[in-house]
Image (cartoon, rainbow, N blue to C red):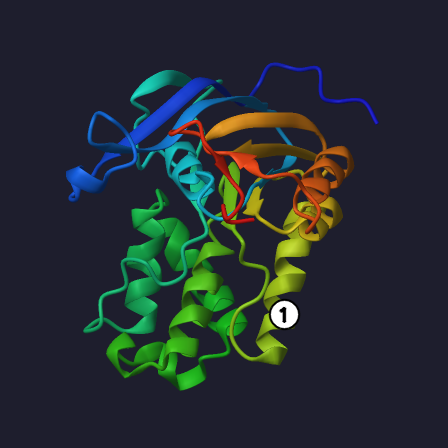
Amino acid sequence: MSLPDTTPLIALRQVGLAYASPLTRFAPARDGRVHALHDVSFDVFEGDKLGVIGRNGSGKSTLMRILARIYDPDTGRVRFGRKIHVQMLSLGVGFEGSLTGRENAVLNGMLLGKSRAHMLGRLAGIKEFSELEDFFEMPVATYSAGMVLRLGFSVAMETDPDVLLIDEVLGVGDASFARKSQDALVARFSSKMTVIMISHDPTIIGTFCTRAVWIDAGRTRMVGTAADVAAAYQKTSSPDAPPRLHHQSGRLDADAPR
């Protein structure tokens, strides 16, 4: 399978980001900061189904926040080929407990960059998909955790972003709704929408994505087809894999998270 040969929708070049550490004395970096990303470079093409794979703590979530424009990188650059709406699938983030499900759906969609008119036109679909019935008109403070997830997922599916960022969420709620939400995500992967999904599971990446980026200790380790990247990553995740080189101290760390 050939890789896309077009102008990148998003281009990352040598991206790095570090957090200030409240425990400077114990910070792993000499400058007293925790370096989540050091040197990440890859392209995202329109219509891509791109997987970002890596162990826990490798910098995947920080990378997603940079792609969503929540964080700016400290080093390197991120270039967006045109004005695009990038949305991270965030279930229930920003919901106000005193507002109803209907009101929160409109407000949350507007926070994600959509107009009020757009969200008003999507309310019937959100209510139907969420299966909240009469609770849709009640304050979110009265919802169970599962009901909040239903509303958040339903809103996210109705905002039609140019790029959808998914952080290891393939199903939410009870078994029936989990299947329904997974089917909705599979439909996005089958559409022309650009989708980026992060995971530490090579099977998920290999199944849903066509291309993949392997992030290891805050650096790009491999870019290629999802099958090739997932296979290479899986080899290093086996019990017989050699100890990893710790990215800040330079020491071999046999107990590093896998």
Q: Nearer the viewer, residue 227 or 208?
A: 227
* The image quarter in which residue 53 lies: top right
The foreground one among 52 and 254 is: 254
* Label 1 crowd (10 A; few <14 / some 14-19 / many >=20): some
The x, y position of residue 247, in whole percent, is 44, 30
Amino acid tagged 1: Lys
- Left of 76 or right of it: where is 184? right
The quadrant in which the N terminus is found is top right
Dividing the picture into quadrants, the one containing residue 254 is top right
Q: Position of residue 62 (x, y in %)?
A: 39, 39
Quick one: 24 or 64, which is closer to the camera?
24
**Residue located 44% across and 45% down the image:** 57
Kindly state the secondary structure of the residue where label 1 is placed: helix
In front of the other: 32 or 214: 32
Q: Is residue 49 above or below residue 168?
A: above
Please tell me which residue is depicted at 54% across the width and 33% down the height of the picture.
Answer: 215
Q: What residue lies at 46% left-to-right and 55% top-to-bottom?
A: 156
Q: How many marks?
A: 1
Q: Establish if 213 lies above or below 121.
A: above
- Picture coordinates of residue 102, whole percent (x, y): 34, 69
Residue 142 is left or right of residue 42, and the answer is left
- Left or right of residue 7, residue 217 in this image: left
Residue lying farthest to the right in this orientation: 1
Picture coordinates of residue 175, whole percent (x, y):
61, 79
Q: Is residue 160 left or right of residue 103?
A: right
Residue picked out by circle 1: 180
